[in-house]
Image (spheres, helix red, strand yellow):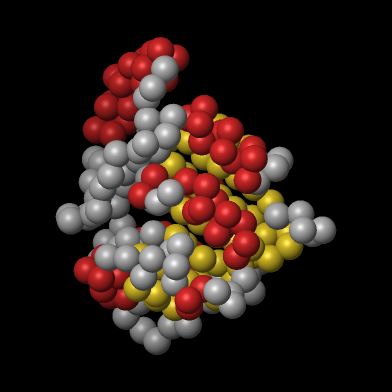
Amino acid sequence: MNDYWNHNTAYHPELLASVPHHTSRVLDVGCGDGLLLQKLAARTKHVTGIDPDATALSQARARFSIPSETRFILGDFLTSPELDTQRFDLITCVATLHHMPLIPALERMRDLLNPGGQLRVVGLAANKTIPDWVISGFLLVPIRLMSKAHRESGYPDMMTARPAESFTEIREAAARTLPGSRVRRRFYYRYTLAWTRPHSS
């Protein structure tokens, strides 16, 4: 399968730069067709992808044509027993958090991190306030121009869902669940959430 560009993959370089070292244990939540997983596996051999979509996970496996230590889990991130005993140095989650209950998902990610481990989320938020709509409207033309310039594409049959929480609600939930986290509005109608688990927790 080939590489491609869209509003989600635009943030892959940032996520790859977050891999601490070549022996890091990394989990990609909602790995989909495995494009980010493939890139992560070039940085560290201890990579796990989880997704509830069997078709997408089959496409992810197809990206690894040679024997690989990459692990694939078909299941629900919130309940998969295969993750219960695992701990990770980096958890990535791209355009997936809004498919799950917000607080339980953040708590699950928090609990699966090693002390000092990093959480990196690229997410979508709902427009609920006047500032939300104004910002989205202001970005409409430049985003369309960038999408055209990059020949935006993706993969067919990708699971989609409308976000339920606004940017403010997500930031407030993150502040309660992940003290010290940083949530920022970003280009391409995305936000990013970054958090490092304290060594003392």
Residue 51 falls left or right of residue 58:
right
Q: Residue at x 32, y 61 (%)?
A: 32
Q: Nearer the viewer, residue 3 or 31?
A: 31
Residue 175 appears in which quarter of the rendering? top right
Question: Percent position (x, y) of residue 96?
Answer: 39, 51
Residue 46 falls left or right of residue 135:
right
Q: Nearer the viewer, residue 168 or 115?
A: 168
The relative height of residue 40 versus residue 6 in the rendered view (above or below) is below
Residue situated furthest left in the rendering:
156
The relative height of residue 56 versus residue 159 in the rendered view (above or below) is below
| Residue 174 shows up from this direction | yes
Quarter of the figure with the N terminus:
bottom left
The relative height of residue 83 versus residue 176 in the rendered view (above or below) is below
The relative height of residue 90 versus residue 152 in the rendered view (above or below) is below
Question: Percent position (x, y) of residue 200?
Answer: 82, 58
Q: Residue at x 29, y 39 (%)?
A: 162
Residue situated furthest bottom in the rendering:
67
| Residue 139 shows up from this direction | no
Question: Percent position (x, y) of residue 64?
Answer: 35, 77
Quarter of the figure with the C terminus:
bottom right
Question: Percent position (x, y) of residue 98?
Answer: 39, 45
Residue 177 appears in which quarter of the rendering? top right
Q: Residue at x 49, y 53 (%)?
A: 105
Q: Residue at x 27, y 61 (%)?
A: 2
Residue 77 falls left or right of residue 194:
left
How many dots with numbers? 0
